[in-house]
Image (cartoon, rainbow, N blue to C red):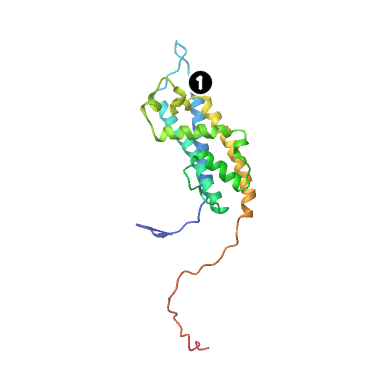
Amino acid sequence: MLEHEELGAVGYEWPRFWPAYLKASRIGRDELEAVHAALERAEPDRDDSRVLTYDELEPVIIAHANMVIGSVLTLRYCVLEVERTAELQPPTEAIDDLERVRSVCVKAGLGDPSSRRGWSTVGELIDTRHRIEHPTQDTIYSVKSWDHVPLAWALTKRALDSFDAFDEMFCAVADAWEGRKRAFEKPGTLNIEARGLRGKRSAKKPPPA
């Protein structure tokens, strides 16, 4: 329950976050694919190269950020849901996203995701997310290691292929979790928090018939 400045009290059903982030990442992926299709239709210059203007590039900036960041958020929120539902203790030591996902899946009985096809792309997306959120001169403007520049990476088919492989791998993990999580669910209990409230009727004398 929250208190809106103008609307007053607002309540909401406790959501599952990761499906929303997965949806957002897929929208970003499709928008990025649309830019790729437009690029393929463009006529090359005399030197057989294609040059994008800023107006043509801006949709790429938005789409690849939504695709990459959304995919990593999907993993992180799914991990939190599994840990909460299966009552797994979060790691006490600092571990990276890859190891935490793998550890949680194994402990919850979902199998080892590192053995699934597409697992290697998870690390690529995580690294790209880090470069997007923590830009440096080398990772944004470098001409030596173009595949370390998120925007350049996004303009190759490698970006779409990496996300598609991740999506397939994650869906297999999510399907396993959907079948497994019922084993951890407990029947709901009614907790009465309010105490010390005075009743409107006397406890000594019953109300008249």
Query: Would you name the residue on which mark 1 appears?
Result: 41
The reply to whether residue 180 is visible in this rendering is yes
Residue 187, quarter of picture? bottom right
In this figure, what is the number of numbered marks? 1
Q: Is residue 158 left or right of residue 178?
A: left
For image coordinates 47% across by 33% down, the residue present is 127
Of 171 and 13, the residue lying toward us = 171
Residue at 55%, 32% (x, y): give it.
Answer: 121
16 to 167, vertically: above or below: below
**Furthest-top residue in this view:** 46
Residue in the foreground of this view, choosing between 52 and 85: 85
Q: In x, y percent, where is residue 96?
A: 49, 39
Query: Position of 209 compared to 141: left or right?
Result: right
> Crowding at label 1, few (<14), some or many (≥20) Cα neighbours within 10 Å?
few
| Front position in the image: 10 or 186 | 186
Q: Quadrant of residue 170?
A: top right
Q: Estimate the x, y position of residue 182 in percent, counting from the top left.
A: 63, 54
In the rendered view of the protein, which quadrant contains the N terminus?
bottom left
Q: Is residue 18 above or below residue 55?
A: below
Q: Position of residue 140 (x, y in %)?
A: 39, 27
